Image: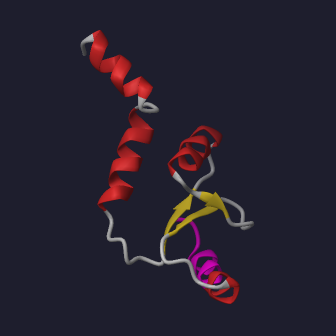
């Protein structure tokens, strides 16, 4: 890969961040949230840079799109936690 291309990718956060951010941007805007299950510290750093936030549940992160009230958040988080790792 040419040096200029590598520099551009690095400037945009690297391959993982570029792919994840682009993928998230392609998802419908009317979602309640986008969920992530993260157990790797490097992956967690990338997820935080693209907008994921910790939920308080181990490994479960979220980007709220149509953010529910606190009761709604708790409801959806419980459903995701019950689902298990994904």
Picture layout, residue 39 above or below residue 83: above
Q: Which residues are the magenta region?
A: 76-86
Q: In the rendered view, does 62 fall on the left or right side of 22?
A: right
Query: Image quadrant of residue 76?
Result: bottom right
Residue 46 shown in magenta: no
Picture layout, residue 45 above or below residue 3: below
Q: In the rendered view, does 38 fall on the left or right side of 65?
A: right
| Nearer to me, 40 or 17 | 17
Picture layout, residue 5 above or below residue 54: above
Picture coordinates of residue 51, whole percent (x, y): 54, 54
Picture coordinates of residue 20, whole percent (x, y): 40, 48
Q: In the rendered view, does 68 fall on the left or right side of 29?
A: right
Q: Residue at x 44, y 40 (%)?
A: 17
- Please, which residue is most extreme toward the top here? 3
Picture layout, residue 74 above or below residue 26: below
Q: Look at the magenta stretch and give its main secondary structure.
A: helix
Q: Residue at x 62, y 80 (%)?
A: 82
Q: Quadrant of the N terminus?
A: top left
Picture coordinates of residue 56, whole percent (x, y): 75, 66
Query: Image quadrant of residue 3?
Result: top left
Residue 77 shown in magenta: yes
Q: Residue at x 41, y 32 (%)?
A: 12
Q: In the rendered view, does 37 fall on the left or right side of 41?
A: left
Picture coordinates of residue 45, whole percent (x, y): 61, 41
- Please, which residue is most extreme toward the left here? 2
Q: Name the colouring of the figure.
A: secondary structure
């Amino acid at each position: 890969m040419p040096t200029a291309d590598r520099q551009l990718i690095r400037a945009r956060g690297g391959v993982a961040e570029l792919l994840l951010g682009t993928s998230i941007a392609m998802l419908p805007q009317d979602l309640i949230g986008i969920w992530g299950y993260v157990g790797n510290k490097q992956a967690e750093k990338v997820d935080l840079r693209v907008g994921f936030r910790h939920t308080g549940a181990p490994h479960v992160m979220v980007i709220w799109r149509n953010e529910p009230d606190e009761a709604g958040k708790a409801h959806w988080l419980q459903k995701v936690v019950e689902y298990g790792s994904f």
